Image (cartoon, coloured by chain):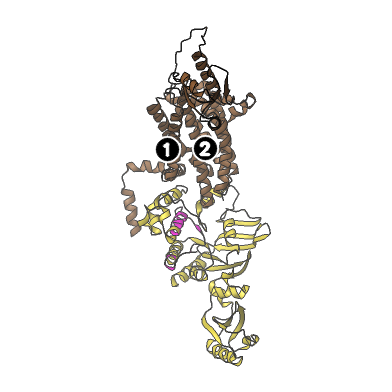
Chain colours: A brown, B yellow
């Protein structure tokens, strides 16, 4: 009796829902929906994927803001220190403090000053104490030297004028935002997939799925598909943030940017699946994830250009998926170049994604 | 009880097709002989129980039958098919599985979980119907993390039933449940069988096996040590009553116990004596006399009908809980 009643209600439910229902009955659709629900119901995951990268951009954007250039910090010591201080007082580029000898040593060692000038006689010999491997010390030495020499009466043979250029698109933050997008796509792909698969393995949920007729490739594919949904949110929030707060513009087409992000996200989900294919513990998978990501954090040019590394390492660096993604994102965001210009990078990403997915499917431990 | 015996008679009288058969199953983990030459036949429509203490090899056997663990050697045939012969998917369409300790995703609701599992099966039942079958209608919007142990186990069974299986595997379905929740699960299993389903369950609760199963196999150390209906196995003790007692000091002469009238056999375990007895009115006064003769003081004494537990003790000298 009860069953009969239920059947009637099922049948009488509006006909327009039938189509949607049959679509949502596909295992791949269900698996993908489940992935998305699980993610959205995990507040920590939402924080790490959406909030953290923006906080990072804020912090780095402030630290490297390109407003008024920083003054050179210099310590003055020795009997003639205060005389030097008055000579430097008029310079806008130098901020000088008078210190005792021991204070000066300490300040230099701790990086509070970039340079220490030691002088016994204001018109006599000057001694510059600094570390030549520190770029800011080099700059301080040149700046201070010039200011003091001019104050002492040096006349430069060349007349010079300065014209300052700071175009939108060439600032550090412009360089940084595409890098952060790339790094975020890597992190959320690898972390998001790695933890949830190993967790399902620990809970014996994978074994339970293996006991159903579910296609195993569809289970893995659902992780990649659900990434596509979050990917658009991640990239959009980062672009919007960069535009609103730092006026970072996308020079190329948004369609190309979307396509590159998509290929990048799929590539990293493949890598995430491969990393998660064997481990049986969270510790195990964490170690592997860090092992995979650490070289890319360092080498792939997120925070500074990867061209700084030696020439011999370049082929290796260029083969890393994050380097390929960062380069492709910068080509479209900073230079407005067409997709064809990043073909190599896109191939690198696609190869990583496909190879990892296929190998993951073979290696995958279901229990 | 009467419904079940009718069912059992029906299934045996009308059809005795074999739903599941395995021959000489063997699975070793390094030195541990988890499954060591197991032969089984489960008939269509029956509830078959695999009984034994923890570590007897029940779960390994069942997972081999479910196609989750490959056997080292031996043959498995389910519903006329075998694993690894290109028909795995078709076979999985027709079996339902509840593993010993699956934790379904905490973040999903009951309905979402059932809907997910439903999508894997072609001949599936509706989500509403399955949720109603396991009486979780009120919890359909609740996250599985918030369910009680019994509700969670019913959800696991809903996931096993949603594909409309012919053969249902339940590995320790009631372990850790309170008596009320256990009773609900028993009703579920009985209802599934009433519709013609075949069940293979493992348990270490003897009363569960006696209550639910048409036939049981008792398993120990990877071997099957007894097989039959619960009634046959109990009858094999040669007596239907058990007298269990303990004394303050160990008996000086325990051998005389077996010569008492009405006593069939004697066992001693963990400081207690178990007498298998055919005639309690004869045996009990004789026992008390004997204890007095040996000047032994009784610490406890109880009598009960023989159960499968006693069969296990008789076969192995250990209780089920000893493991």
Chain bearing mark 2? A
Q: Position of residue B163 (x, y in %)?
A: 46, 52
Residue at mark 1:
A51
Q: Which residues are magenta?
A: B153-181
B205 within the magenta span: no
Tag 1 near tag 2, CB within 8 Å: no
Query: In terms of sequence position, does the residue under pointer 1 or pointer 2 come before the other?
Result: 1
What residue do we see at 43% from left, 37% from top? Answer: A50
Measure the C-alpha gap from mark 1 to mark 2: 20 Å
Q: Quadrant of residue A58?
A: top left
Give the number of callouts: 2
Local crowd at mark 2 within 10 Å, few (<14), some, or many (≥20)?
Answer: many
Q: Quadrant of the C terminus of chain B?
A: bottom right
Which of these two is toward me, A56 or A283?
A56
B173 within the magenta span: yes
Q: Quadrant of residue B69?
A: bottom right
Q: Position of residue A81 (x, y in %)?
A: 51, 24
Q: Quadrant of residue A347?
A: top right
Judged by depth in the image, the label closer to the viewer, 1 or 2, is: 1
Residue at mark 2:
A269
């Amino acid at each position: 009796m009860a069953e009969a009643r239920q059947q009637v209600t099922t049948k009488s439910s509006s006909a327009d829902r039938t189509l949607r229902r049959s679509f949502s009955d596909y295992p791949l659709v269900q698996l993908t929906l489940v992935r998305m629900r699980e993610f959205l119901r995990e507040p920590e995951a939402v924080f790490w994927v959406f909030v953290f990268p923006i906080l990072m951009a804020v912090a780095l954007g402030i630290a490297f803001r390109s407003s008024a250039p920083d003054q050179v910090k210099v310590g003055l010591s020795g009997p003639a220190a205060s005389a030097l201080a008055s000579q430097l007082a008029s310079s806008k580029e130098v901020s000088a403090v008078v210190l005792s000898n021991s204070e000066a040593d300490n300040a230099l060692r701790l990086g509070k000053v970039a340079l220490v000038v030691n002088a016994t006689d204001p018109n006599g010999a000057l001694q510059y104490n600094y570390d030549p491997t520190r770029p800011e010390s080099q700059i301080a030495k040149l700046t201070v030297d010039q200011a003091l020499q001019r104050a002492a009466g040096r006349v430069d043979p060349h007349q010079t004028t300065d014209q300052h250029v700071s175009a939108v698109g060439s600032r550090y933050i412009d360089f940084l935002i595409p890098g952060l997008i790339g790094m975020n796509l890597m992190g959320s792909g690898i972390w998001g997939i790695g933890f949830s698969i190993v967790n399902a393995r620990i809970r014996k949920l994978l074994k339970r799925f293996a006991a159903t007729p579910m296609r195993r490739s569809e289970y893995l594919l659902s992780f990649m598909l659900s990434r596509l949904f979050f990917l658009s949110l991640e990239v959009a929030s980062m672009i919007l943030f960069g535009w609103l707060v730092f006026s970072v513009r996308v020079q190329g087409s948004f369609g190309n940017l979307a396509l590159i992000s998509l290929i990048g996200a799929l590539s990293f989900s493949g890598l995430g699946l491969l990393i998660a294919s064997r481990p049986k513990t969270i510790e195990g998978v964490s170690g592997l994830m860090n092992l995979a990501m650490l070289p890319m954090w360092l080498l792939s040019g997120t925070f500074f250009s990867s061209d700084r590394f030696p020439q011999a390492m370049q082929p290796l660096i260029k083969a890393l998926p994050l380097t390929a993604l960062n380069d492709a994102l910068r080509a479209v965001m900073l230079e407005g170049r067409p997709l064809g210009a990043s073909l190599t990078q896109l191939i690198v990403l696609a190869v990583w994604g496909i190879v990892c997915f296929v190998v993951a499917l073979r290696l995958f431990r279901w229990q | 009880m009467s419904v079940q015996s009718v069912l059992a008679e029906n299934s045996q009288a009308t059809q005795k097709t074999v739903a599941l058969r395995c021959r000489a199953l063997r699975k070793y983990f390094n030195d541990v002989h988890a499954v060591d030459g197991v032969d089984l036949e489960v008939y269509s429509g029956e509830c078959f129980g695999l009984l034994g203490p923890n570590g007897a090899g029940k779960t390994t056997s069942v997972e081999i039958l479910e196609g989750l663990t490959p056997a080292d050697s031996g043959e498995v045939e389910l519903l006329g098919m075998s694993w690894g012969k290109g028909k795995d998917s078709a076979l999985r369409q027709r079996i339902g599985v509840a593993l010993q300790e699956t934790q379904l995703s905490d973040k999903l609701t009951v309905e979402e979980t059932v809907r997910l599992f439903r999508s894997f099966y072609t001949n599936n039942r509706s989500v509403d119907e399955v949720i109603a079958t396991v009486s979780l209608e009120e919890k359909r919007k609740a996250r599985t993390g918030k369910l009680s142990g019994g509700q969670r186990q019913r959800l696991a069974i809903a996931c096993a039933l949603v594909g409309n299986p012919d053969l249902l595997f339940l590995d320790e379905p009631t372990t850790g449940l309170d008596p009320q929740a256990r009773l609900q699960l028993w009703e579920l299993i009985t209802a599934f069988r009433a519709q013609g389903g075949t069940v293979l369950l493992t348990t270490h609760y003897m009363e569960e096996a006696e209550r639910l199963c048409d036939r049981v196999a008792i398993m120990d150390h990877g071997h099957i040590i007894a097989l039959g209906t619960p009634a046959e196995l109990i009858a094999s003790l040669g007596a239907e009553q058990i007298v269990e007692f303990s004394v303050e000091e160990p008996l000086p002469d325990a051998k005389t116990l077996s010569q008492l009238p009405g006593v069939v056999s004697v066992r001693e375990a963990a400081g207690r004596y178990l007498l298998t007895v055919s005639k309690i009115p004869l045996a009990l006064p004789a026992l008390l006399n004997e204890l007095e003769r040996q000047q032994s003081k009784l610490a406890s004494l109880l009598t009960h009908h023989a159960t499968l537990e006693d069969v296990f003790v008789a076969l192995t000298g250990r209780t089920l809980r000893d493991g």
